[in-house]
Image (spheres, rainbow, N blue to C red):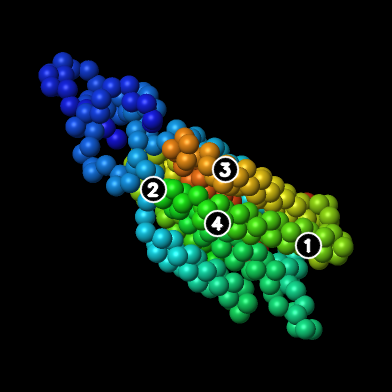
């Protein structure tokens, strides 16, 4: 953080220090325009999935693919995550993986609810 | 992560070196996030908690949708617009997506110009971002009005599963609230940039921190767009 309590040791820099730290994140403007363009293309493609009414497995494969690519570009470049310190990257990106457990649990739960409704409520919802 | 080499400690026994380094790193945030502006680290931690809130909404939506026994309303039709008598699926949502992505683009450039100490361009780009954000919220208000007129309520709708309305109002409402708060925050930071506040303090990080929040709002929309509107 801003105020180091002791001088930085050489051993702390096993990886090269972030290229732009003190004056803040400085990168050529061009990279933002390129990512902006890519996000437009990806959004158009995910919209076209719906426009051409692609169904079945192909639909969700494409939707998830475009979603992950868009999210990755926003986090990595627009939010500067790819230039951040490794400790910050792990501290922020690892905890959300726990959500997979919640998804899995609720998936099982909703399956149970679904069949309970089918069996006992005669298809009511 | 730091690998502090302490000669002689190896022989002293105790926990393995890697474990000690890990503990050292995390024993103080000043070690872990060295070189990261404190405001930025805190914003990231806030965004992490916000990730869990939005995930809870999306996961409860998944739970409701996969447990209903009646058909889920077709989002492609529900959110379609009539253009010259032809129904175009999801048109308004697609426009909203492009508006929000553009606002993220202008925000990223505002951060960049901020660090170049370009006061005027930074202010202009932040105001453009706020304007696009306000446009987004207005279109969402239009969408809400349209659906409410068509009879969508949190407890029911004319097309299918009753849970549709509850998910829709909760998820898009909470996201819209974030966008509105973001617009206000952008206006505050932009006015401080304009008045030269950050030139005096010599620290333009506030623009980047505001930008992090704004990109996060765009990021959440990516997931809402995929799971709620396209699925």
Q: Which residue is mark 2?
A: A25
Residue B73 occupies quadrant: bottom right
Q: Is residue B128 left or right of residue B25?
A: right
Relative to residue A100, is residue B71 drawn left or right? right
Location of the C terminus of chain B by quadrant is: bottom right
Q: Which badge, 4 or 1, comes first in the chain's sequence?
A: 4
Which residue is denoted by mark 3 in the rendering?
B195
Tell me the distance, in whole angstroms, between the alpha carbons under discs 2 and 4.
17 Å
User: What is the chain identity of the residue bearing mark 3?
Assistant: B
Residue drawn 37% across the image and 59% down it: A28
Circle nearer the N terminus (3, 4): 4
Question: In the rendered structure, the residue with mark 1 lies on which chain?
Answer: B
Chain for disc number 4: B
Name the quadrant of the N terminus of chain B: top left
Query: Between marks 3 and 4, how big is the CA–CA gap?
Result: 15 Å
How far is the residue under mark 2 from the one under mark 3? 22 Å
SS at badge 2: loop
Q: Which residue is mark 4?
A: B125
As drawn, which residue projects farthest toward the top? Answer: B12
Q: Nearer the viewer, mark 3 or mark 4?
A: 3
B158 over A119 or under it: above or below = below
| Residue where numbered disc 1 is placed | B142
């Amino acid at each position: 953080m801003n105020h180091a309590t002791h001088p930085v040791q050489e051993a702390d820099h096993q990886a090269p220090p972030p290229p732009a730290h003190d004056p803040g994140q400085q990168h050529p403007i061009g990279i933002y325009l390129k990512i902006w363009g890519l996000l437009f293309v990806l959004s158009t493609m995910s919209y076209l999935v719906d426009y051409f009414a692609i169904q079945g497995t192909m639909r969700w494969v494409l939707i998830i693919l475009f979603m992950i690519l868009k999210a990755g570009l926003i986090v990595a470049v627009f939010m500067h995550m790819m230039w951040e310190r490794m400790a910050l990257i792990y501290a922020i990106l690892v905890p959300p993986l726990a959500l997979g457990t919640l998804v899995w649990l609720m998936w099982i739960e909703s399956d149970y609810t679904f069949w309970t409704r089918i069996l006992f409520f005669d298809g009511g919802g | 992560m730091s690998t502090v080499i302490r000669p002689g400690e190896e022989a002293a026994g105790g926990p393995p070196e890697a474990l000690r380094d890990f503990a050292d790193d995390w024993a103080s945030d000043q070690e872990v996030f060295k070189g990261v502006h404190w405001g930025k680290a805190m914003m990231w931690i806030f965004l992490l908690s916000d990730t869990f809130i939005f995930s809870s909404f999306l996961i409860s939506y998944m739970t409701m949708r996969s447990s209903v026994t009646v058909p889920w309303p077709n989002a492609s039709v529900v959110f379609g617009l009539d253009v010259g008598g032809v129904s175009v699926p999801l048109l308004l949502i697609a426009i909203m997506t492009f508006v929000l992505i553009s606002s993220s683009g202008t925000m990223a450039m505002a951060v960049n110009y901020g660090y170049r100490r370009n006061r005027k361009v930074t202010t202009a780009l932040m105001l453009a971002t706020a304007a696009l954000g306000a446009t987004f919220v207005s279109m969402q208000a239009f969408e809400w009005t349209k659906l409410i007129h068509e009879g969508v309520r949190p407890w029911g709708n004319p097309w299918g599963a009753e849970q549709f309305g509850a998910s829709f109002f909760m998820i898009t409402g909470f996201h819209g609230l974030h966008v509105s708060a973001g617009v206000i925050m952008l206006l505050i930071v932009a006015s401080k940039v304009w008045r030269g506040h950050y030139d005096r303090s010599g620290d333009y990080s506030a623009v980047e921190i505001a930008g992090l929040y704004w990109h996060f709002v765009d990021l959440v929309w990516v997931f809402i767009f995929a799971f709620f509107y396209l699925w």
